[in-house]
Structures are given as structure tokens and as C-alpha cells.
Amino acid sequence: MVAAPTLIDETARIRAVLASVPDPEIPVLSVVDLGIVRDIQSDRVTITPTYTGCPATQVIERDIRAALDSAGYRHVQVETTLSPPWTTDWISREGRRKLLEYGIAPPTPAGEREVCCPQCGSNDTAEISRFGSTPCKALWRCRACAEPFDLFKCH
């Protein structure tokens, strides 16, 4: 006899679906890697955008909805909440690794200013502009290899 699926199994399956949804601005990261997915229940997924004005929020909501529908989870509601506000602390360890491999320096812990170059690993780096390719990133340059790179801003 096969055991009936449990709520834990159901939320794990939903999490797996969400782990396949890429962030539209950094497609190497999933919405789970980025920490946008705050809670998963059998009937509801709660997300928090990286910031209130994030232009990708509607795209993320649409992509999550499409992935859930495609996987047979039409009954699962997608709720967006702004409280508590998203923080870079919610980026997973795997997400930080993926950012680095993609050429984006992951956020540094609060108060730490040493930024390592994602190209060569040097910490001889300097901020060029507080504004990078998207509002959540700053533009930096490595003095060792002379390559510019984005730093995911800590917030």
C-alpha cells in the first residue's frame, strides 16, 4: 500500500517548482536562491520583492504563477508581502556561489567593505559607481585585473 502524500511532501514539490523559476534580471539565480520566496504552504506561496520599486516584481509573480500552473498547482495562491523587507541575508549560500560564478560579486556582510573581484579573486577593488546595471547592483572595478564587475548591493 502506498502512503498518502503529506503536506511536507507537497510543500517540497512546490519548492522544487519554484527553484526552477529564474530571476528575470539574474537568470542564473532562481527565486528561491535569491530569497524572494518567503513561505510555502500547500495552498499559498508568499514572496517578498528585493525592494518595493523593483521593476521585475510583476514578471516574477507572473513567472511563478505560470510555473505553478504548469506543474498542476493552480490552486496555490501567490501573495506578495513587503514586510519584513527583503534583505541580502536571505540569498542562499548556493545563490551567493552562483552570483560569483556568473561574474557578480555577492553582497558583503553589513559593515564590511572588502569586495573580492569575481574574475580573479583579488580584493584590490574600488567602487566606480553606486549604480550598476540594475538598481540592486553597484559598479566596481578590480585594480589587479582591470575588469569591471557588478556588486550585489547589501540591504
Image: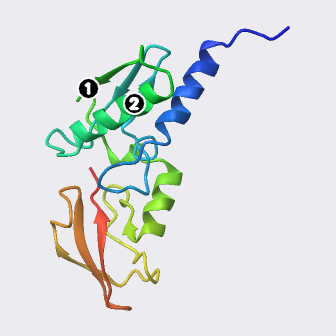
Q: Is residue 153 above or below residue 55?
A: below
Dot 2 or dot 1, earlier in sequence: 2
The span from disc 2 to disc 1 (Cα, nearest Å) is 9 Å
Q: Residue at x 36, y 38 (%)?
A: 36
32 sits to left or right of 110: right
Q: Mark 1, residues whose alpha carbon is within 10 Å: few (<14), some, or many (≥20)? A: few
Q: Mark 2, residues whose alpha carbon is within 10 Å: few (<14), some, or many (≥20)? A: some
Colouring: rainbow
Instruction: Give residue 140's mark.
Output: none
Q: Position of residue 60 (x, y in %)?
A: 30, 39
Specify the quadrant that holds the N terminus.
top right
122 sits to left or right of 128: right
Q: Nearer the viewer, residue 112 or 99?
A: 99
- The reply to whether discs 2 and 1 touch (Cβ–Cβ < 8 Å) is yes
Q: Which residue is mark 1?
A: 81
* Disc 1, SS: loop
Q: Residue at x 51, y 34 (%)?
A: 17
Q: Nearer the viewer, residue 6 or 140?
A: 6
Q: Which residue is mark 2?
A: 38
Residue 27, image quadrant: bottom left
Q: Position of residue 11 (x, y in %)?
A: 55, 22
59 sits to left or right of 45: left
Q: Position of residue 51 (x, y in %)?
A: 21, 42
* Disc 2, SS: strand
Identified by mark 1, the residue type is: Thr
Q: Residue at x 27, y 38 (%)?
A: 49
